[in-house]
Amino acid sequence: MSFAAILRTIVEECGGGIGAALMGNDGIPIDQFSRENRADENGNDFDVDTAGVEFGRILEDIRKTFDSLAGGLVEETIVRGARFSLVFRTVDEENFLIVAIEPDGNLGKARYLIRRHLLAIRSEL
């Protein structure tokens, strides 16, 4: 199964999925899927790739902090906002997955689907 097919499955089956992207820690998107564009009141579209790039720097800081606390590998980070939630899941030491979900979406199911498809994503890398 291709990255795009896996990302599509997660977004479409989680309930309230907006989009997903597989990103390198260097900020370069490997693949992505978006269900729809989500413009805010100013007409700005939501872009899951951009979210991955912008939050990638923050995730790197979280990784460094966890290392300094001897916390091990950061597996998952969730950021909830008024317009959407973002789930970040470490795939391996060089890549992570980001999934965007509507505020009333099923965050638990999204996390389950990410875990269920994680092995398939890793085997494709």
Image (tube, helix red, strand yellow):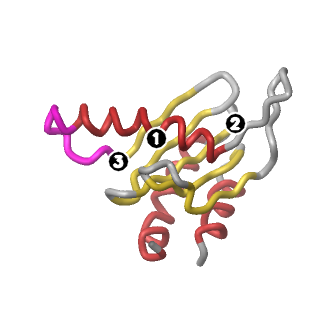
Residue topped by disc 1 = 56
Magenta segment main secondary structure: loop
Is disc 2 surrounded by few (<14), some (14 to 19) or many (20+) residues within 10 Å? Answer: many
Q: CA distance from mark 2 to mark 3?
A: 22 Å
Front position among marks 1 and 2: 1
Q: Earlier in the sequence, mark 1 or mark 2?
A: 1
Q: Callout 1, which amino acid? A: Gly
Q: CA distance from mark 1 to mark 3?
A: 14 Å
- Quadrant of the rendered structure where residue 104 is? top right
Question: Is 52 above or below relative to 44?
Answer: below
State the mark number for residue 75: 3
Q: Secondary structure at mark 2?
A: loop
Q: Secondary structure at mark 1?
A: helix
Q: Position of residue 77 (x, y in %)?
A: 42, 38
Is disc 1 surrounded by few (<14), some (14 to 19) or many (20+) residues within 10 Å? Answer: many
Q: Position of residue 13 (x, y in %)?
A: 68, 57
What span is colored magenta in the figure?
67-75
> Which quadrant of the figure contains the C terminus?
bottom left
Q: Earlier in the sequence, mark 2 or mark 3?
A: 3
**Which residue is pictured at 53% across the width and 36% down the height?**
54
Front position among marks 1 and 3: 1
Q: Position of residue 16 (x, y in %)?
A: 71, 43
**Which residue is pictured at 66% across the width and 22% down the height?**
82
State the mark number for residue 102: 2
Q: Earlier in the sequence, mark 1 or mark 3?
A: 1
Is disc 3 surrounded by few (<14), some (14 to 19) or many (20+) residues within 10 Å? Answer: few
Q: Callout 2, which amino acid? A: Glu
Q: Callout 3, which amino acid? A: Glu
**Which residue is pictured at 70% across the width and 42% down the height?**
47
User: Image check: 119 left or right of 40?
Assistant: left
Q: Is residue 68 magenta?
A: yes
